[in-house]
Amino acid sequence: MSEAGGGRGCGSPVPQRAPWSLVAATAALCLVSATSVWTAGAAPMSREEKQKLGNQVLEMFDHAYGNYMEHAYPADELMPLTCRGRVRGQEPSRGDVDDALGKFSLTLIDSLDTLVVLNKTKEFEDAVRKVLRDVNLDNDVVVSVFETNIRVLGGLLGGHSLAIMLKEKGEYMQWYNDELLQMAKQLGYKLLPAFNTTSGLPYPRINLKFGIRKPEARTGTETDTCTACAGTLILEFAALSRFTGATIFEEYARKALDFLWEKRQRSSNLVGVTINIHTGDWVRKDSGVGAGIDSYYEYLLKAYVLLGDDSFLERFNTHYDAIMRYISQPPLLLDVHIHKPMLNARTWMDALLAFFPGLQVLKGDIRPAIETHEMLYQVIKKHNFLPEAFTTDFRVHWAQHPLRPEFAESTYFLYKATGDPYYLEVGKTLIENLNKYARVPCGFAAMKDVRTGSHEDRMDSFFLAEMFKYLYLLFADKEDIIFDIEDYIFTTEAHLLPLWLSTTNQSISKKNITSEYTELDDSNFDWTCPNTQILFPNDPLYAQSIREPLKNVVDKSCPRGIIRVREESFRSGAKPPLRARDFMATNPEHLEILKKMGAASSIDAEDGLRFMQEMIELSSQQQKEQQLPPRAVQIVSHPFFGRVVLTAGPAQFGLDLSKHKETRGFVASSKPYNGCSELTNPEAVMGKIALIQRGQCMFAEKARNIQNAGAIGGIVIDDNEGSSSDTAPLFQMAGDGKDTDDIKIPMLFLFSKEGSIILDAIREYEEVEVLLSDKAKDRDPEMENEEQPSENDSQNQSAEQMTSISQEVDLVDQESPEESSLNSHPESLSPADTDNAASVSPSEQNSNPTENHETTSLDGECTDLDNQLQEQSETEEDSNPNVSWGEKVQPIDSILADWNEDIEAFEMMEKDEL
């Protein structure tokens, strides 16, 4: 988002159709005023430190961009662990994730305007020449219409916008003659066939060469698309129309937005996640501000900023009122059902909602922006990065982190709106975490699991397009940028479009269909930008006072009242609703409450539905009680120095790495390699971590044999060649059905691909030292600095070493967060085969991704609301040796049996069939 669109006027209304230069100017004045309030009362970060951090961002960008150009270009993306390019069709399919790749040098195009923002004008000129010379947009490949629009079309338009700006300045790009714009127009026409539907909503995918529906196209049979996929086109398509004069692009994008507005749920004014592109029926009827919907809301507000069409602001304000009424539960943003908006649709949040505080800044609603941003920052401080999804009690739900930039985006805009130096410190933390945990010799690697610190072999193009842009702008002063950033608006991919487009080629018919479908409340539509005296009432500690109550929101004591409760009932003295975790079958009052649920009132019915959902989740959680989270094997010797982290399966026996200090040592292969008999090379494994192969005997037997030989730990490597944690769920090694208390050393399991990394390293360097732990530890800077050559030498040497070690380093072929989450968690093994490995059928694995995915606490002690009461109850139960776990579960099973019909009805509602 761009601060240039901050609103209309400072405290006094501006005519609704004011000239856009006035709108942009007053928006800039608003932000200056807001900043002045803060700088008057807070000690700012010194100019020297800001410059130092800005230079650090530049070096980080050079590391990422330079390695892409050296090792990957002209491929779409860099694979930073194996130091090579990701070419579609040459790597294992990752499902929908690969739809962004079109063999059009994606990362280069996505990085064009970032080069200018970072003052790398010579590199920008060279990059534009490469795009014009090498990029082909006529490839026989099926791509995502959404991703191609925001990354490629947006990248070309952003590059064109800054190319003409540089040309006007007279030093660079003097040869440029709108070549990028012509490429953008060519691509725009290639995307237009996707809109050939009765509704005007585009197909989700298109073949760049053959279009839609042709036999050669291999697409055109889809029926559904996400709301964001259809509603995130207007900025790029309208800009293309305004730049070229070809109105067809803006017309098609407007038609899609109009249709989505028509299909909103009228009583709640919310939209669902997925819609049928032919009938307009909602397929997924849950609604939030995260994945699947996010940028639809963003583009309504920004379309108003860029195009000056009031109907877009009216629609945004209508939706925003519904969001704040139903979805916003400060500091949380929880999905709800569009037909029953008072009922939460799920109990977790995804990382994409981190953009929303930045959008709220553009709207001018600062307080909830500060609250949600602070909650997200507390989660990041626990895990170094924001997990792909986390629960309402701040447990990890999906552990991946693909280096998403949304939190950095919101940090930048909150700093621009408040001037509070606190947000500079937040940005500094992001820089430190990226360098410490994600930086590898060939770039920056996504996190496969934020709990263990293991990596994925991916560096998405948006990392260069957005992350470095927002971080640099956060620390840059106005004189550090060669153009006025206030004259541009950011797209959802952070590409820059000039605000003067609002007065260019205005030939589009602006039919305002908004009021045809809703009763508009004028008080909801603020035609002025926020008055800073209201936002910051002469109190420089205003934002701090909002953040302070949230400092411990994910700490050892969980916040009370974080889930929506009926405040009116509480104020009147009524007791809070009965929660499943507190239920006791022997409590007459609890039984009486159960009888009332669903019978007395709609409130009681809502309590009953929530209670049943909690019972189902609690029962599922109890079934997974014995599961352990994944562990980490971190290579700490030269030349790795902790940069390579492998995801490992735990064991149900031996030293528990979550309770004891990590084990560090050199590795050695055991003889026999299967470890199923007394070792013949005890001197080789004495005091080391033994490598043994899976198969031919029990895991516990292997552990005893290497322990008797003096090993301090063991790593079991799968004997199934080609197996990987990318394609199979991790599992935990079970015992042999006997007492395993005699096993005192830690044991971890690696699939074949991960294990081969260590074996290849031994062949290359002979002595390889690893760290076995519950999560990756900080790298050893002293060891790393001992042999630190020059920057270029270091990069080239490390690249060669990494490539020679393995061509497959912890690859992650992730289809989607939901699907890949199944691969990130251990499956409990029983002694069913020679290695005690119980397999799980594909149908069982995929039947319910949420149930299969382990939910891990952000810290070991944070459980849920009413934490102290629950701990007291557990202590009382644990103190009674006569009470078995089965006896504790029995009341739940009885209740679920009694409520079978109600549970079925609830599950139907979860599928949006009510």
Image (cartoon, grey):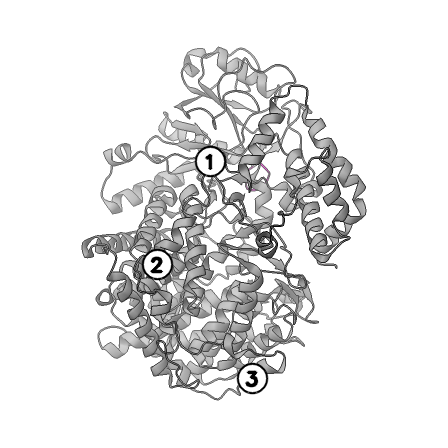
* Kind of residue indicated by mark 3: Asn
Q: Which badge, 1 or 2, comes first in the chain's sequence?
A: 2
User: The C terminus appears in which quarter of the rendering?
Assistant: bottom right
Task: Tell which circle, 3 or 2, labels the residue nearer the N-terminal end.
Answer: 3
For label 2, count other residues whose C-alpha is less than 10 Å away and answer few (under 14), some (14-19) or many (20+).
some
Q: Is residue 911 above or below residue 715?
A: below
- Residue 542 circle label: 2
From this viewpoint, which residue is outermost toward the front? 573
> Magenta stretch mostly in which secondary structure?
loop
Q: Is residue 339 above or below residue 891?
A: below
> Looking at the picture, does residue 272 appear above or below residue 786?
below
Residue 201 in picture, x, y percent from top left: 61, 73
Q: Residues at badges 1 and 2 in contact (C-beta under 8 Å)?
A: no
- Horizontal side, residue 348 vs residue 893: left or right: left
- Does the magenta portion include 726? yes
Residue 109, located in which quarter of the rendered image?
A: bottom left
Location of mark 3 (residue): 512
Q: Residue at x 64, y 38 (%)?
A: 582
Q: Nearer the viewer, residue 198 or 301?
A: 301
Q: Position of residue 517 (x, y in %)?
A: 63, 79
Q: Which residue is mark 1?
A: 646
Q: Which residues are magenta?
A: 724-730
Separation of marks 3 and 2 at Cα, in angstroms: 39 Å
Tell me whether circle 3 and circle 2 mark residues in contact (CB < 8 Å): no
Q: What amino acid is at disc 2?
A: Tyr
Residue 258, relative to residue 222: is it above or below? below
Residue 257 visible (yes or no): yes
Q: Nearer the viewer, mark 1 or mark 2?
A: 2
The Cα–Cα distance between marks 1 and 3, rounded to whole angstroms, is 55 Å
